Image (cartoon, grey):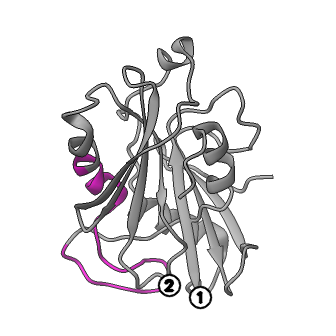
């Protein structure tokens, strides 16, 4: 993953981000509107935070997304991007199956001091990745499972971000064939669960 500023990471990655349907840990059910069992994005968040708690306890989550487009039968690998005001840099933590795979420190370009104060916590994050995938699939009108999908959300949108992505909204992309152009894109509000199709 490129260690560029969060302001660039968000529009580039989340415009390519597509939703997952991950059932609760320990379940194993696949169908058109659900994906393979495995830890959800919220499941992996405590591990991601713990990986940074000893060095940058002030780190705030900015973005979480699937590392790569995956099939509905693939266990997800989640990438969490944090910003630490005390360190003045971003951090990437990768988590799969609840286990931290890597921690990387990134560039020093990020929120200003005034922007840092406005970055929220994650209390507003109510809709987890499994539910977001299911809602997005239903709203998409698709009648068969995608070949691959991507999904992610951001908690904060910088002034430099000119994308259509909305904070605390899952952007889910479904791909009917390998490639960079999704078949369907659906946004799912991570607080209310409301779905919409971005323009």
In percent of width and height, residue 92 lies at: 41, 48
Q: Are marks 2 and 1 in contact (CB under 8 Å)?
A: yes
Label disc, if present, on residue 29 of the rendered structure: none
Local crowd size for mark 2, using a 10 Å CA cut-off: few (<14), some (14–19), many (≥20): some
Q: Quadrant of residue 4?
A: top right
Q: Which residue is mark 1?
A: 144
Query: In front: 126, or 43?
Result: 43
Residue 192 drawn at (x, y percent): 48, 43
Magenta span covers which residues?
Answer: 26-47
Q: Of the numbered discs in the image, which one, if any, rests on residue 32?
A: 2
Above or below, 129 against 80 in this view is: below
Judge whether residue 91 is colored magenta. Answer: no
Residue 165 located left or right of residue 47: right
Indicate which disc, 2 or 1, sits on the residue closer to the N terminus. 2
- The rendered magenta stretch, by its main secondary structure, is classed as loop
Q: Residue at x 22, y 69 (%)?
A: 25
């Amino acid at each position: 993953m490129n260690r560029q500023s969060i302001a660039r990471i968000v529009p580039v990655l989340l415009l390519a981000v597509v939703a997952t349907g991950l059932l609760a840990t320990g379940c194993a059910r696949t169908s058109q509107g659900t994906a393979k069992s495995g830890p959800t994005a919220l499941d992996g968040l405590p591990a991601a935070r713990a990986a940074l708690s000893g060095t940058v306890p002030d780190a705030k989550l900015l973005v979480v997304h699937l590392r790569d487009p995956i099939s509905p039968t693939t266990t997800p690998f989640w990438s969490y991007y944090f910003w630490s005001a005390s360190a003045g840099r971003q951090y990437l933590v990768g988590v799969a199956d609840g286990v931290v795979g890597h921690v990387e420190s990134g560039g020093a370009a990020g929120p200003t001091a005034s922007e840092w104060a406005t970055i929220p916590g994650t209390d507003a994050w109510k809709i987890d990745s499994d539910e977001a995938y299911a809602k997005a699939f239903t709203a998409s009108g698709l009648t068969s499972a995608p070949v691959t999908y991507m999904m992610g959300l951001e908690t904060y949108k910088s002034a430099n971000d000119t994308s259509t992505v909305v904070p605390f909204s899952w952007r889910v992309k479904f791909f009917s064939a390998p490639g960079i152009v999704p078949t369907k894109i659906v946004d799912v509000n991570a607080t209310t669960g409301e779905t919409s199709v971005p323009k």
